[in-house]
Image (spheres, helix red, strand yellow):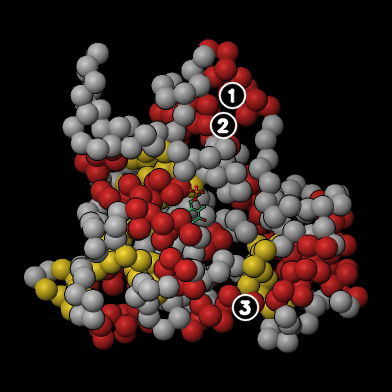
Amino acid sequence: MNKQWMEFTLSIKQLYKKAFIALHEPTFNEKEVEYVTDCVETGWVSSVGSYVTRFEEDLAKFVGVKRAIAVVNGTAALHIALKIVGVENNDEVLIPSLTFIATANAVSYLQAVPHFIDINEDTLGVDPFKLEQYLNGIAELRQGELYNKQTNRRIKALVPMHTFGHPCMLDELVALCEKYKLVLVEDAAESLGSYYKGKHTGTFGKVSAMSFNGNKIITTGGGGAILTDDEELANYAKHLTTTAKVSHRWEFVHDEIGYNYRMPNINAALGCAQLEKLEQFIEHKRDLTRFYENLVTDIEGIRLFKEPIDTKSNYWLQVILLDEQYNRDKILSFLNEQGVMSRPIWMPLHELEMFKQCPKMDLSITEQLKQNVINIPSTPTNEV
Ligand SMILES: *Cc1c(COP(=O)(O)O)cnc(C)c1O
């Protein structure tokens, strides 16, 4: 590797003052210790306790949504989000092929079928124009519901994902869903603190899902949330994620097959402390973007991915885009050997064994981007 790349890794190591720099580490201080200690000392560590309600309220307020239901992880949030909007056995659900596996898994848990769609280069999220053209060809409305003419299955929902925190083209996707009678469910797992035209991501869909896994912008250890403005759906989500138990002082009556998906109190305590710092994390992330922007100008053939127009991104994971002149894996092995942890974008889901038979549209942009998108260290730091 040439001198410019060596200097690039040196600058990153100087910034973080470490020999090995992880892709994204959680940041804790006394607040987390205080709230978690409170759980331990009072014994309220598990399925009952006040931090869950507080976390749900704080989160809903931050995002600007009526209700948030805290659950064990983002995958569970997606599972329930899809279930409560009516995704059923044998339905198809439109999802990008370039997303984390959870999106497709959640669809599969309902015995529904992921239908893979392409993204665009400006947002790294679903391309509404390409999707509309595609649907015009393969789908038709039958009594107010969209059907895939090739498979004869109902296409029930669209699940766009805001890749690495960058909001996708929500106005167009909302309009498209109205036109084609699709339910919009946002996978907002990566976009807490990201806005589209001044409105928080996760507020455009009928329901949306978030994740607070250890590597996300805030963490509850493991955790997730279902967000919605619909009180009825929110109550149903809460019911389903708490074993569908009918409220009673002593009886164990459950009125359907529910899930034990409730977020434990000790995790919610961590989340309350983390939420208090979210604004600061985002500021530091955006400072880090400016730092990287300066660095990459010195290297030919790479650029830093910037937030799409009309959006404010949380810059959860920093992205560099490589020109064709580069071999992605060579760059990845160099950076990782230097102690600068770097990862490729996900392997497109339509290439995975269990999803190979699923319907898909032309995925040329996905195929192209899988070769040249790399994530570089993104832990917020106040050093830049
Ligand atoms: C993190 C993530 C999820 C949820 O993941 P969990 O680990 O189950 O919390 C879902 N979708 C995307 C795109 C994600 O990045």
Residue 69: percent from left, percent from top: 37, 38
Give the x, y percent position of residue 21. Answer: 78, 53
Answer with mark 3 or mark 1, whichever residue precedes in sequence.
1
Helix, strand, or loop for circle 3? helix
Indicate the secondary structure of the residue bearing disc 2. helix
Residue 264, above or below 302? above
Mark 3 vs mark 2: in front: 3
Residue tagged 3: 371
Task: Indicate whether 307 appears above or below 149.
Answer: above
- Sooner in the amino-acid sequence: mark 3 or mark 2: 2
Residue 55 left/right relative to 250: right
Between marks 3 and 1, how big is the CA–CA gap?
42 Å
Q: In the image, what residue type sits under mark 1? A: Val
Could you tell me which residue is drawn at 40 percent across and 45 percent down? 76
> Is residue 349 shown left or right of residue 205?
right
Residues tagged 3 and 2 counted as in contact (Cβ below 8 A): no
User: Badge 3 local density, few (<14 within 10 Å), some, or many (20+)?
Assistant: some
Question: Circle 2 sits on which residue?
Answer: 270
Q: Is residue 189 left or right of residue 340?
A: left
Furthest toward the front, the residue is 353
- Is 249 situated above or below 157? above
Q: Position of residue 234 (x, y in %)?
A: 28, 41
Question: Of the residues shown, which amino acid type is indicated by label 3?
Answer: Gln
Q: Residue at x 67, y 35 (%)?
A: 28
Task: From the image, tell me which residue sits under label 1.
Answer: 36
| Mark 2, other Cα within 10 Å: few <14 / some 14–19 / many ≥20 | many
Amino acid of disc 2: Leu
Q: Are marks 3 and 1 in contact (CB under 8 Å)?
A: no
